Image (cartoon, rainbow, N blue to C red):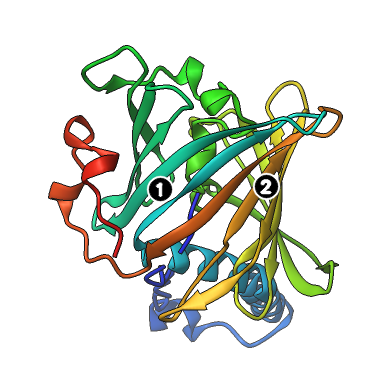
Amino acid sequence: MTFPRRVVVLSRSRKFGRYPAARWANCTFGTIPASIALLALFSLVHLSRTFAANPDQDTALTGSRQRIEKLDYRMTGRLTRVEGNGKRTNYKFVAKAHWFPDGLRLLCEISGPGAEKTSLLLHMSATGHVTIEAVLPGQKTASALPFERWNDPLVGTDFSYEDMVENQFFWKNQEGLPPAKYGARDCLVLKSKSGPQDQTYYDSVTSWIDRRILYPVHEVKTLRGTGQQKEFIYYGLRQIGGVWSATQVEAKVPGKPGSSILVIEAGSGKANLGRKNFDVSQFSAQGEKTK
């Protein structure tokens, strides 16, 4: 999940070889050659339409990837689970993220009401492949978090471990849906669909992306197999130093009482982080200073 992207240009080239002159020397431009020429022309027209694709889809996808590929932030805040009866459980949330040549690294620590802490290091490659290392309560060293746990509630909230990164924008299968309004905002709508090569619990993620700032305002994630959905709403969008971010992100499951809210209280969108800042075994919330 991103708070506070290099344009990937896919180029296709085709080389059309020349038929030897002798092969055409005895041909007049009659019915058969004309048919071939028309067929080739229609094929090229269809090909150009295919490559042109949906301009709204291209805008939404490119803008979302560029946004993530420019991430370099520190932040502090709180993660709150709100029960159906209004009872709140608050957790301190500290995080930092940076996009490196090999992808995104996100390091965060969640401190519970007691002394327990959960530390996570997520790495997402430019193809959307994710790995998660964790130091869970009661553990002293980091270890790979098994995929079977990626959809577990993060410290009892409606956020899962996998929800901490937006890997859906890097999946191969992307579909542009008709533009729509979300509240008062004009949005581009992008449906990202996972494939067998994607390690994820989600079958698809549909994102409503503000057309003007290319930042998501609403997302609906659908779980594989069950079809169960989870909704994310982004509030308080603001721009600081040219970087757009949300001040609050709410996660809720339709039909389940209550919701969970991640509130960003302070941070920097240009933290100048390096690889040395992403050692999960040495991460200490008390030692972090927010710029």
Q: Position of residue 248 (x, y in %)?
A: 61, 55
**Looking at the image, residue 66 lies above or below residue 165:** below
| Residue 250: image tag | 2
Which residue is drawn at the image coordinates 75% and 70% (left, top)?
A: 187
Q: Is residue 113 above or below residue 218?
A: above
Q: Say what amino acid the circle numbered 2 marks.
A: Glu
Q: Quadrant of residue 48?
A: bottom right
Please indicate whether residue 119 sits to the left or right of residue 45 in the image. left
Residue at x-position 48% and y-position 33%: 197
> Is tag 1's residue or tag 2's residue first in the polypeptide sequence?
1
Q: Amino acid at mark 1?
A: Thr
Q: Which mark is residue 127?
A: 1
Q: Residues within 10 Å of mark 2 (few under 14, many from 20)?
A: many
Left/right of residue 184 with respect to residue 271 in the rendered view? right
38 to 194, vertically: above or below: below
Location of the C terminus (image quadrant): bottom left
Q: Nearer the viewer, residue 173 or 270?
A: 270
Check disc 2 and report its element: helix, strand or loop: strand
User: Which class describes the residues within 10 Å of circle 1: few (<14), some (14-19), or many (20+)?
Assistant: some
